[in-house]
């Protein structure tokens, strides 16, 4: 899109001003820049920036801005240094340089840079406001439905969160790896999105929208079946003191008053890494390998940290399917897209209804909950594969 010299200047001034204001804000520093989740979200900008525009000049500019920011924040304003702050400063510097490169790029190059810069900015903004959405959910639900989810997990006769929680405590290296992959969720999202931009150009926008929309849509579902995770319910009893299967079978199920943001079901971490894995098709093998590593360790970390029940991960499959179908807007509303959309969101709602109002039904036989889990995962994968096959067929006919 053509830009006049004056338009470029008008875009540059607020970009630099906003950057300077945030970089020098003590409130922003202490609330956001020292946060592990937000720091890595900012650092993921580097991935999008340098995959789409690999440049030694940009690298030197980013390094110079990092040094300038560190000098101002730590030597002039006397902010307390923190490890995650360095990730944040690197990401902010990259975002500034990337933005300026996009504004001042030649008209022929700006379109590609916009495909990187705008999503990078929105990803970071979304991460910053995520806590606000969770706090809003918490204020609406003083009572949570964790006992219903725990009852389902116990009906499997294998309580995975407690087993993995013990493994995390017994093997600190495993716990550390799990936490790194859990906190670093923004890294594979940025990596896979940037890879798709380089391969598909504008067609990568659908994956960006799916990644971005999964959070707000997931918060809506959090309000339908609010739950926190076993570590928040059992507290000091997690992971060493679970109820026995016999005790769990007799547990009186009711909403319980526990403080905290209800963000257990569906597991959005699981939904995001599923989308990362699905969208990594067709990319380089090393991108696929990184996507799979995050998928694997996220399964361990979501339960090992006690933040999720096993059923949260199962319900993430149809939810992720629904999000992919919903955001595939470059495709027509063909039969398979509609089928995937219905299977995804109706499947998610069906699980919510069954967990809340049919919990005792799962205790009829241990094979029943296992079978339902297997069917849910298999059906989600089948519908997702059919959606992708239909998309390839549509591209072949329109290509």
Image (cartoon, rainbow, N blue to C red):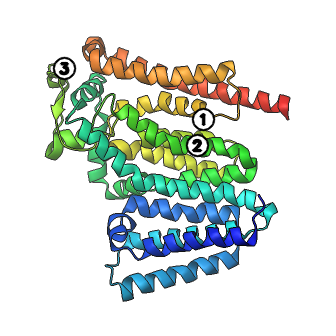
Between marks 1 and 3 in the image, the one whose residue lies nearer the viewer: 1
Farthest bottom residue? 75
Marked residue nearer the N-terminal end (1 or 2): 2
Query: Can you say whether 147 is above or below 192 in the image?
Result: above
Q: Quadrant of residue 312?
A: top left
Q: Are marks 1 and 2 in contact (CB under 8 Å)?
A: yes
Question: Residue 266, can we see it?
Answer: no
Q: In the image, which is nearer the foreground, mark 2 or mark 3?
A: 2
Q: Residue at x 36, y 45 (%)?
A: 133
- Residue labelled with disc 1: 327
In the picture of the structure, the residue carrying the numbered disc 2 is 209
Q: Return the x and y of residue 191 as percentages of the image width and height.
A: 60, 55
* Callout 3: SS: helix
Determine whether, in the image, residue 234 is placed left or right of residue 184.
left
Q: Could you tell whether 353 is left or right of 19 in the image? A: left
Q: Secondary structure at mark 2?
A: helix
Q: CA distance from mark 2 to mark 3?
A: 42 Å
Density class for disc 3 (Cα within 10 Å; few <14, some 14-19, many ≥20) is: some
Mark sitting earlier along the chain (1/3): 3
Image x and y of residue 209, in percent: 58, 43
Q: Quadrant of the C terminus?
A: top right
How far, Cα to Cα, is label 1 from label 3?
40 Å
Q: Secondary structure at mark 1?
A: loop
Left or right side of 394 for 33? left
Residue located beneath label 3 in the image: 249
Residue 56 showing in the rendered view: yes
Q: Residue at x 73, y 57 (%)?
A: 112
Where is residue 34? Give x, y as percent: 36, 68
Q: 246 or 142, which is in the foreground?
A: 142
Q: Would residue 32 be found to the left or right of residue 261 on screen?
A: right
What mark, if any, has residue 215 been given in the picture? none
Quarter location, residue 1: bottom right
């Amino acid at each position: 899109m053509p830009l006049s010299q004056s338009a470029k200047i008008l875009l540059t001034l607020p970009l630099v001003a906003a950057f300077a204001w945030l970089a020098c804000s003590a409130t922003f520093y202490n609330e956001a820049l020292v946060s592990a989740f937000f720091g890595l979200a900012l650092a993921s900008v580097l991935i999008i920036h340098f995959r789409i525009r690999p440049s030694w000049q940009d690298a030197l500019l980013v390094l110079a801005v990092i040094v300038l920011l560190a000098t101002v924040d730590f030597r002039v304003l006397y902010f307390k240094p923190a490890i995650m702050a360095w990730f944040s400063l690197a990401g902010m510097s990259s975002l500034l340089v990337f933005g300026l490169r996009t504004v001042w790029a030649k008209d022929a190059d700006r379109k590609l840079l916009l495909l990187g810069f705008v999503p990078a900015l929105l990803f970071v903004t979304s991460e910053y406001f995520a806590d606000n959405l969770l706090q809003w959910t918490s204020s609406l639900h003083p009572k949570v439905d964790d006992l219903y989810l725990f009852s389902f997990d116990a009906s499997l006769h294998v309580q995975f969160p407690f087993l993995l929680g013990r493994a995390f405590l017994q093997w600190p290296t495993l716990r550390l790896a799990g936490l790194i992959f859990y906190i670093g969720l923004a890294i594979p999202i940025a990596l896979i999105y940037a890879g798709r931009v380089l391969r598909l150009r504008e067609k990568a926008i659908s994956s960006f929208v799916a990644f971005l929309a999964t959070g707000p849509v997931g918060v809506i579902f959090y309000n339908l079946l609010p739950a926190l995770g076993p570590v928040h319910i059992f507290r000091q009893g997690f992971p060493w003191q679970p109820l026995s299967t016999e005790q769990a079978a007799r547990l009186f199920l009711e909403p319980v008053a526990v403080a905290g943001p209800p963000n257990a079901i569906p597991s959005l971490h699981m939904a995001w890494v599923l989308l990362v894995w699905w969208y990594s098709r067709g990319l380089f093998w090393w991108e696929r390998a990184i996507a799979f590593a995050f998928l694997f360790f996220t399964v361990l970390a979501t339960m090992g940290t006690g933040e999720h029940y096993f059923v949260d991960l199962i319900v993430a499959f149809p939810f992720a399917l629904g999000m992919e179908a919903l955001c595939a807007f470059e495709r027509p509303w063909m039969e398979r897209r509609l089928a995937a959309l219905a299977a995804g969101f109706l499947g998610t709602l069906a699980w919510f209804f069954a967990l809340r109002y049919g919990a005792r039904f799962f205790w009829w036989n241990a094979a029943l909950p296992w079978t339902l889990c297997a069917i849910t995962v298999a059906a989600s994968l089948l519908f997702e594969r059919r959606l992708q096959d239909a998309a390839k067929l549509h591209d072949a006919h329109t290509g």
